[in-house]
Amino acid sequence: MTFVGWRAGVRVIAAGLVGLWLGAASAAETATVTIGVYPYPPFGYVADGRHTGYAYDMIEAVVRRAGFAVAVEEVPVMRAVVMLRESTNLLIMATKTAETVARYEAHWPFCFETVTHALLMKKATRYSRLEDLPRDTVIGAFLGYTLKTHLAELGFTDIQFASENGQVADMLLHGRVEAWASFESAAYYLLEAKGVGQDAVKSIPVQRFPFCVMASRNTSPDILARLHAAAAAIEADGTRAAIRARYARYLGPDLPLPAKP
């Protein structure tokens, strides 16, 4: 299944597909789809006692548009592999890379954003390009960070981990690491929460990838197809754009989805 092109696909077809799926669903008991959540703002977090965030809001909108009931379950990052293998109708946000495709036994029903993985460094650094960074640069990352293997393959030898991304922000601000490996957008959100402006850091891009939804291995083909159609319809009618606008100051330009992970 390809995820490139559905943004620009035929809107009438997308809407028609959703209508067909919802018509079929109305005669049967409504299935429940579970959104697996973990703290990774601005994509997923808790505010005023409720789950929110760009990814959470998108997934919830797609699930409801597809005609399913929504449940929420906390997903410890280190148990994601097991939960995707053993759960039914579980959705988790993830960057789609060759590494994640190989690691997780999961389906990928839709993607909705292009994210920039970057190394955030203090503004005063003299470095502007990844290739110029010394390979002994001390890099901080959170345990579930997608590109930790990639950074090691590039020759970086000192990567330090924390349980949450916000802890790595503190490590950078307090000088315990020289660079912070993160989604650029997640870094900007966390810095703002700490009262630090985006102009206090320099972002050195590492790679760009599609940000997508993984579905557990036991999710039925019918549910996967309905989610895919609903995601296309939400793109076509402007719902995705409206959701994205709430987080745009962290996300930057709305880039086309890349052809491959």
Image: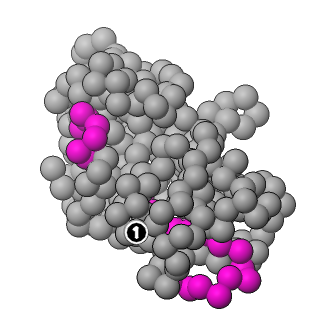
Residue 193 quadrant: bottom right
Q: Residue at x 68, y 49 (%)?
A: 166
Q: Residue at x 56, y 85 (%)?
A: 128
Left/right placement of residue 71 relative to residue 200 reads left
Label 1 neighbourhood size at 10 Å, few (<14), some (14-19), many (20+)?
Answer: few
Looking at the picture, how far across and down is residue 183, in whole percent?
53, 60
From the viewer's perspective, is residue 83 above or below residue 162?
A: above
Residue 62 quadrant: top left
Q: Residue at x 44, y 71 (%)?
A: 206
Q: Is residue 137 visible?
A: yes
Looking at the picture, how far across and down is residue 234, in whole percent?
39, 50
Looking at the picture, how far across and down is residue 222, in whole percent?
18, 28
Question: Please, what secondary structure does the residue beneath circle 1 have?
Answer: loop
Question: Which residue position is annotated with label 1?
Answer: 155
From the viewer's perspective, is residue 21 above or below residue 199?
A: above
From the viewer's perspective, is residue 31 above or below residue 81?
A: above
Question: Which of the image's four quarters has the C terminus?
Answer: bottom left
Taking the magenta stretch, the answer to whether it contains residue 127 is yes
Looking at the picture, which amino acid does disc 1 mark?
A: Gly
Residue occupying the far top of the picture: 29
Magenta residues span 101-129
Q: Residue at x 24, y 38 (%)?
A: 107
Q: Is residue 23 visible?
A: no
Pick whichever, 65 or 131, lies toward us. Answer: 131
